[in-house]
Amino acid sequence: MIKYRITFADENRSLQVEAGKTVLQTQIDAGLTPDAFCGGKGKCGKCKVVIDGKEVLACQTVIDRDMTVYTGQQKTEQAQILAEGSQAQLAFLPGDLPGDLDNPLLGAVDIGSTSVVAYLMDGKTGELLGTRSALNPQRQFGADVVNRCSYALTNGAEILSGCIRNTINTLFRELARELGRVSEEIVRIVMVGNSCMHHLFLEISTKNLALAPYTPEVTEALELRAADYDLHVHPWAQLWWLPNIGGFVGADTVGCLVASDLDTCEEMTLLVDIGTNGELVLGNRDGIISCSTAAGPAFEGAKITCGMRGSVGAIDHISLENGEFRIHVIGDGEATGICGSGLLDGAACLLKAGKIDETGRMEETCYFTDRVYLNQRDIRELQLAKAAIAAGIQILCQRKGIRPADIQRVLIAGAFGNYLDPASACAIGMLPPELAGKITSVGNAAGEGARMAALNRGQFERSKVLAEKAEFVELALDPDFQDVYVDEMEFPEEYA
Ligand code: FES
C-alpha cells in the first residue's frame, strides 16, 4: 500500500496517509472536524483548502503525492453559539436522584445540528454552575439532517453517535474540571435535539427520517442509563430524553415548549426555531400545532457563495445609510464571508435599494466588500429557504383558521433567531410583514427546557403532555403546501 505524507499546516499536524483517500477524509480521520456541508458530494464548495497555492475542494482531491494542506480552519472555529435562554425562574424539584453522593451534579444538553451546548447544575440547589458549547462534530458528514441520516444509513450510525458522545463527554469533563469536580459526579442528564440528532445520538435507525414523510422511529420520552450510551458520568446516572413530536419536530422543540407558556397562554403565539431546519409551533391554551420546514442550511452559510457560519470574519449585519451599505463584521476584522443574519439584512437592503425586484431578479452581483457579495444564485437560495418558513406559517394559520395578522406574538428561539434583525426577516417576507413589532427573541429555549426538566421531574412529565398535545402537520402531505410555497418565493411588494 503506497502512503504519502500529508501536512496540515494551520493545525501543525502531519500524518502518513494511504494513496487514494480524499483530503476531506484525511481531515476527518485526523480529527480536524472540517466543514462538509454537502457531505462530500462536491456540491457545496465549502470544503475548500489550499494546496500548492491553489484553492481546491478537499472532498474531490485524491491523495496521490506528499501534500501540504492549508485549511484556514483556525480562523473560523470561533463560532457564536447561543447558550442563554430567557432566564426564567426555574423551580427546583428534582425528585429521586440515583446514587448516594452528598453533592451530586445534574446536566442538560441541547444537541443542535450545528452546535452542542452543555449545562451543569448543582444537584442540591439547582444553581447553574456552568455552560459550555462546541460545534457539532457531525457537521463533517453533512450540514443538514437529511445528509447526515443518509451518511448513517450508508456508513453506519456509530461514527456519528461516537463523535457526538465524545463531544458531550469533553464538555462535561471540562465544565466539572473548572469547578474542581469530576464528571462522574453527574447523576442525571436531560437531552434535547431534533429527531435526527436524537436518533443519531441513540443509534436508532434513521431510515424513516431520510425519506418523506420523515417519520421518527421513536417519539416517546425516554428514561435510560447514561452508562449505556458511553457517557462518562456516575455509573448509575439517569439519561432522559424529552419526547419527539413528529417529522423533524423533535425534543428540542418540546424543550422550547417546556420553557415557554404556549400551552397556558391566551395570546395566539407563533414559536419559530430556525436552524438547519425551521421548526414552527402555533397555538395557545386551546391547542398547539407544529411543523418542520426544510429551510435548508442557507442560513448557516451553506449554498451561499460567500456564506459562512456566524463566526469571526462573518458579516452579521448590513444597513443602508444614505444609499451606502454599512456592514458589521463579527470580531471587527476583515470580512471573509456572510452569515445568516447578514444574508437577511443584505437581501432586505438590496430590495429597499431597488437592486432586486419582487421576483428576486437581480441586475448585477452586489458587493458589500471587495470579496463578499451576493449574486443571483444566492438570492434564489435565500428565496427557497425563506419561502419554506413563510409557507409553513401560512399552512399552520390555515389549519388554525386564522390569518397571520391574528398572531399576537412571535417568539424566536435559537442562535439565528437571536442574531437576526426581525425587521429584515419581515422585509424579505420570511416572517409575515404584519408581525413586525410582535417579535421577541427567547434565546436557547430548547436548552432551557432541558435544564428545567433536569431540575424538576414535573417539567419532564409536562414535556410528555406537551408532545401529546402538539398536533404535527407534515407539510409534504398538505395539498396546498406546494402552491403556497411557490407564492411565498416572491418578496413583499412594498419593499421591492
Ligand atoms: S463540496 Fe466538498 S463537502 Fe461539499
Image: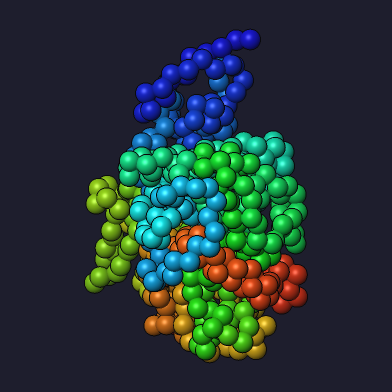
The number of callouts visible is 0
Residue at horizontal 35%, vertical 53%? 129
Q: Nearer the viewer, residue 68 or 412?
A: 412
Q: Position of residue 431 (x, y in %)?
A: 49, 75
Residue at horizontal 43%, vertical 55%? 123
Residue at horizontal 50%, vertical 88%? 267
Residue at horizontal 49%, vertical 36%? 33
Q: Nearer the viewer, residue 454 or 300?
A: 454
Q: Nearer the viewer, residue 452 or 206?
A: 452
Color scheme of the displayed model: rainbow
Up-down relation of residue 277 to residue 401 (above or below): above
Q: Is residue 481 visible?
A: no
Instruction: Find residue 223 and report its image quarter.
Output: bottom right
Q: Nearer the viewer, residue 216 or 476?
A: 216
Q: Is residue 78 visible?
A: yes
Direction top: furthest residue? 1
Q: Position of residue 156 (x, y in %)?
A: 70, 37
Query: Along the horizontal axis of the image, is 376 left or right of 474?
Result: left
Up-down relation of residue 84 to residue 436 (above or below): above
Q: Which quarter of the image is occupied by the C terminus?
A: bottom left
Q: Which quarter of the image is occupied by the N terminus?
A: top right
Q: Position of residue 119 (x, y in %)?
A: 43, 53
Q: Position of residue 50 (x, y in %)?
A: 42, 30
Query: Along the horizontal axis of the image, is 327 left or right of 121?
Result: left
